[in-house]
Amino acid sequence: MLRALVTRPRHQAGELVAGLQARGIACLVEPMLEILPRPWDPRPLLAGPQAVLLTSANAAEALLRAVAGRALPLPPILAVGPATARPLCRAGLQLGLRRIEAAGGDAADLLRLVRRRLDPRGGPVLHLSGEAIACDLGAALAADGYAVERHVVYAARPATRLSPQLRAALADGGIQLAPFLSCRTAMAFRDLVLATRLESACRGMVGVALSPRIAAAMRPLPWCALATAARPDLRSLLAALDASLAGIVDAAFGRPVMP
């Protein structure tokens, strides 16, 4: 049986694990990031902003913790993608959310959604984010006249070591697949593998990246194959994984010849 390394935070790994297991793939879950909530003042949510921007599932969870199940007159929510919006959609009626809309999955998609839906003269826009950001939405939107207030609601700390279980699995060739959904997760894994001189294990592994930026972070490792999802969503990631595995099988055994 094939075995995949899942590096998502444990509380966010379920959907990916389910998709892999549905394909008959076993999973070893070892988070490469520790998510640390940061104290923040949620009162600006009630001060009349025209919208809240969310660029990660961790930011969505911080919003849910802040409202603590109370029905409040919250502004519309614009999320970077469906995975970020999903927990809010489930809680939307109870929380009094007027509108939750998901962009296509990356920052460029979210910026386009903001420009279509929001008025630069309509008041401030809140951005709930982690300490480290891949795209400064405020700077990107300032030229269009938007006032974006960024609130740091969590930090992500990279793992400092590989567990003995994972080190043994890598050394023994016990991992064949490694999907990555975040650049920082991919970088943390890459750096730890290089530091422990286990990079040769990747020669027997298929790496799958959610985006070209993540693929670039993975590229220093000598993967058997490295695939990138066509779109930054889980369905596309799994489709890229399927295509990579099929390609390897075809290369090893050849396509069957029809009689």
Image (cartoon, grey):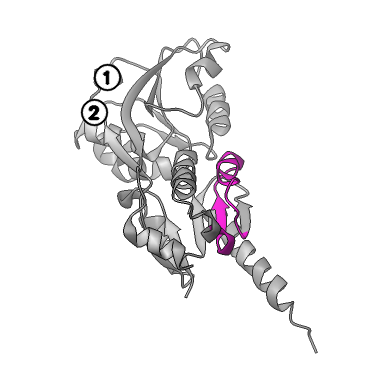
Query: Which is more toward the observer, 125 or 99?
Result: 125
| Secondary-structure class at tag 2 | loop
Magenta residue check for 251? no
Q: Residues within 10 Å of mark 2 (few under 14, many from 20)?
A: few
Q: Is residue 125 above or below residue 121?
A: below
Callout 2–callout 1 Cβ contact below 8 Å? yes
Residue type at mark 1 is Leu
**Number of the label disc, if any, that sits on residue 11:** none
Residue 152 percent across, percent down from the top left: 33, 24
Which residue is labeled 2 in the image? 72
| Secondary-structure class at tag 1 | helix
Identify the magenta region.
202-224
Which residue is labeled 1 in the image? 46
Whether residue 96 is visible, yes or no, is no
Q: Is residue 63 above or below residue 234?
A: above
Whole-angstrom CA distance, mark 2 to mark 1, is 8 Å
Residue 159 percent across, percent down from the top left: 35, 43
Q: Is residue 122 above or below residue 93?
A: above
Mark 2 or 1, nearer chain start: 1
Whether residue 153 is visible, yes or no, is yes
Quadrant showing the C terminus: bottom right
Query: Which is more toward the observer, 159 or 228?
Result: 159
Q: Is residue 48 left or right of residue 69?
A: right
Q: Residues within 10 Å of mark 1 (few under 14, many from 20)?
A: few
Residue 208's quadrant in the figure?
bottom right
Residue 3 percent across, percent down from the top left: 45, 67
Residue 243's quadrant in the figure?
bottom right
Residue type at mark 2 is Leu
Magenta residue check for 206? yes
The residue at the point 19 percent across, 35 percent down is 68
The residue at the point 38 percent across, 59 percent down is 166
Q: Is residue 25 left or right of residue 98?
A: right
